[in-house]
Image (cartoon, helix red, strand yellow):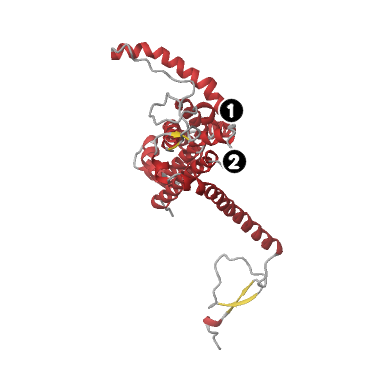
């Protein structure tokens, strides 16, 4: 009896026979005679068009920023723009040092990070490791409601509630500070427009973002790691802080950077609550001006189109754009470097 050569044997597949030696991918969908369904082809082109629109929009933003910023940098050296310590573009004589705006931006963002990042991580740990399904179902919608509040509402909340509350707390604490330090001149004064109120409002706004991203990172940690730690006698606190959090470190760090970049790019809260005083200071009780706050001021003002004052809007926006791009690149690099792979 003739034995068929296994290398040339035919096996039945959808649409015809194929040899064992041919390349048939495991789990590949049937070829249907080499033709795709019209709906599948249409959806493929639709998805590709959406991706191209996103890329084209990004390049369009870059083109607008650079086309409007180049005339400004022809008149103002970029070194003096980035290193100058005085920002008075609408005065005579004007000064175009963007450092006060950068300082104000990072002062507000750093304050928001101090409040939002630890609290967001703790909320994520509670929802992922401690909360019952009922408590989780109750708390998640509340956090989502915070994420849906318009930023202009947060701005007026900071101005009309947070600032008076801080003023009241400082007035009550001033006599105690004078007694402890024996300095009668010590009287911390918080201005109506200040960086601290804006930082607290931004922290409340970014808290859902941090907690949601951190919870997603904690949730994908395999259950086997938790069970192995419990088998060795670890407590729930030890499992959460010494096993789950280190295993999800890349996702947590990426969420932190994305939250900080969100705080850097916030506009309405800082425009309402932080003030419009461009100065280099580390005192959060003083009024500062951020890059986004200045953009709002120029966009709503009566600056002539094409003037040097109008072009500062795009120059500041370009600096802000590259700062956020660098933060996103750092986030991607962290994820790639410290990503944990599990079977």
Residue at figure coordinates x 58%, y 30% from the top left: 152
Count of marks overlaid on the render = 2
Q: Is 159 situated left or right of 189 in this image?
A: right
Quarter of the image with the C terminus is: bottom left
Q: Say the numbered circle drawn on residue 305.
A: 2
**Front-most of residues 29 and 65:** 65
Which residue occupies the extreme front position in the image?
93
Which residue occupies the extreme left position in the image?
182
Q: Where, by quadrant of the figure, is residue 13 drawn?
A: bottom right
> Which of marks 1 and 2 precedes in the sequence?
1
Crowding near the residue tagged with mark 2, few <14, some 14–19, many ≥20 C-alpha atoms within 10 Å:
few
Q: Is residue 182 above or below residue 252?
A: above
Residue 60 place in picture, x, y as percent: 58, 51
Residue 287 place in picture, x, y as percent: 45, 26
Which residue occupies the extreme right position in the image?
38
Q: Say the numbered circle drawn on residue 153.
A: 1
**Front-most of residues 121 and 330:** 330
Residue 74 place in picture, x, y as percent: 47, 48
**Front-most of residues 72 and 342:** 72
Quarter of the image with the N terminus is: bottom right
Residue 9 place in picture, x, y as percent: 56, 81
Q: Is residue 35 above or below residue 202?
A: below
Q: Secondary structure at mark 2?
A: loop
């Amino acid at each position: 009896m003739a034995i068929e050569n296994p290398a040339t044997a035919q096996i039945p597949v959808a649409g015809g026979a194929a040899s064992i030696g041919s390349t048939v991918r495991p789990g590949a969908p049937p070829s249907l005679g080499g033709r795709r369904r019209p709906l599948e082809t249409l959806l493929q082109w639709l998805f590709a068009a959406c991706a191209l629109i996103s890329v084209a929009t990004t390049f369009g933003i870059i083109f607008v920023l650079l086309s409007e910023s180049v005339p400004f940098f022809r008149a103002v050296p970029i070194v003096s723009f980035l290193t100058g310590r005085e920002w008075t573009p609408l005065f005579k004589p004007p000064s175009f040092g963007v450092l006060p705006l950068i300082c104000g931006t990072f002062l507000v963002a750093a304050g928001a990070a101090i409040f939002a990042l630890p609290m967001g991580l703790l909320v994520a740990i509670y929802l992922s490791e401690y909360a019952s399904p009922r408590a989780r179902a109750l708390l998640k919608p509340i956090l989502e409601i915070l994420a849906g509040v318009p930023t202009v509402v947060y701005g007026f909340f900071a101005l009309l509630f947070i600032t008076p509350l801080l003023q009241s707390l400082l007035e009550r604490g001033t006599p105690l500070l004078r007694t402890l330090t024996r300095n009668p001149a010590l009287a911390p004064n918080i201005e109506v427009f200040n960086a601290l109120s804006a930082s607290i409002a931004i922290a409340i706004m970014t808290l859902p973002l941090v907690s949601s991203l951190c919870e997603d990172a904690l949730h994908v940690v395999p259950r086997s790691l938790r069970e192995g730690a419990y088998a060795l006698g670890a407590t729930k606190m030890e499992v959460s802080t010494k096993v789950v959090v280190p295993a999800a470190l890349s996702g947590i760090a990426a969420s932190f950077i994305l939250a900080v970049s969100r705080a850097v790019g916030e506009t309405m809260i800082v425009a309402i609550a932080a003030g419009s005083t461009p100065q280099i200071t580390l005192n959060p009780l003083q009024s500062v001006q951020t890059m986004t706050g200045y953009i709002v001021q120029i966009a709503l003002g009566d600056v002539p189109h094409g003037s040097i004052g109008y072009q500062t809007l795009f120059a500041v926006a370009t600096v802000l754009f590259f700062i956020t791009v660098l933060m996103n690149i750092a986030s991607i690099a962290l994820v790639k470097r410290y990503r944990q792979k599990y079977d």
